[in-house]
Image (cartoon, rainbow, N blue to C red):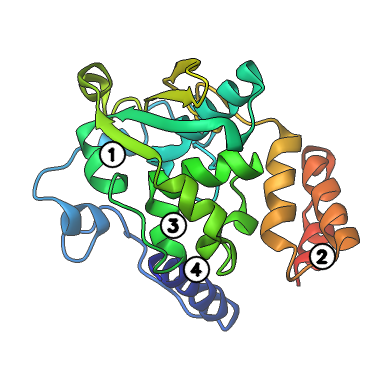
Amino acid sequence: MHAGRASQSGIIAAFLARDGFHGPTQILEAQDGGFCQAMSDQFDLSVATAALGEAYHSCEVNIKPYACCASSHSAVDAVLELKKLGGFSPAEVDTVIVKTAKGVQVQCGFPYRAEGVVQAQMSLQYIVAVILLDGMALLEQFSDIRIVDPQVLNLAKRVQIVLDPDIDKVYPQRYANRVEVVLKDGRRFETRVDFAKGSTEHSLSFAEVALKFKSMTAQVLSAEAAECIINEVESLETKEDIRSLTKLLM
């Protein structure tokens, strides 16, 4: 709901602006009601304009490629890497051990129970199980039907979440995870991922962002409409204005 309320506020602001509503001119620095004063008794306003026009922090924004808690993303990448390395099937898996930070263990290491989509999105047990089975973690993997699938539930029970002191030392500067897969024949595969796909250090390609967009809009846009929007966004830097894009979004 919290993300929905932010979107709601944006829509309300757009409608107000369209109808000529004027807001305050000092939204950051006003002593009475300004954002900075509201958030902290001590703040450095100069940080807001430091390296203005030179440093673009939007380039440092992380994009989540998976429809689940960001703390789990490096574990997702680790599982995908191990599947590719070992070439094993989910049926061959005996146990999966996710070695993580204490904060992640508390946040995402609880025993999985199929009690709703958000429960699944926050559960490392569920996330690891579904990535082993499906090889992806998009909206489809967190549907009401998928989160109660007996095959996923059975595999989730074999996922263990344990504390790793080395991983804990770098958290939360790094949302790292170490994953070990133990097969029924005794073979073991292990890897550590410090920077998940979609982070500043391991950024997504345009094609990968487009894939996420298609997944997220599949229920409201036709494949043709989604492709037109993607093409417009890809060529934005060559356009004089964005009206051709906004028409597609209405």
Circle 1 sits on which residue? 104
Whole-angstrom CA distance, mark 4 to mark 2, is 19 Å
Tag of residue 1: none
Q: Which amino acid type corresponds to the residue marked 2 in the rendered image?
A: Leu
The picture places residue 230, in percent across and down from the top left corner, at 80, 49
**CA distance for labels 1 and 2:** 40 Å
Of the two numbered discs 2 and 3 on the same chain, state the one appearing first in sequence. 3
| Residue hosting label 4 | 7
Residue matched to label 3 = 120
Label 3: few (<14), some or many (≥20) within 10 Å? many
Counting residues from the start of the chain, the first of labels 4 and 3 encountered is 4
Q: Is residue 65 visible?
A: no
For label 2, the residue is: 248
The amino acid sitting under disc 1 is Val
Nearer to us: label 2 or label 3: 3
> What secondary structure is found at the residue carrying circle 4?
helix
Which callout, 1 or 2, points to the residue nearer the camera? Answer: 1
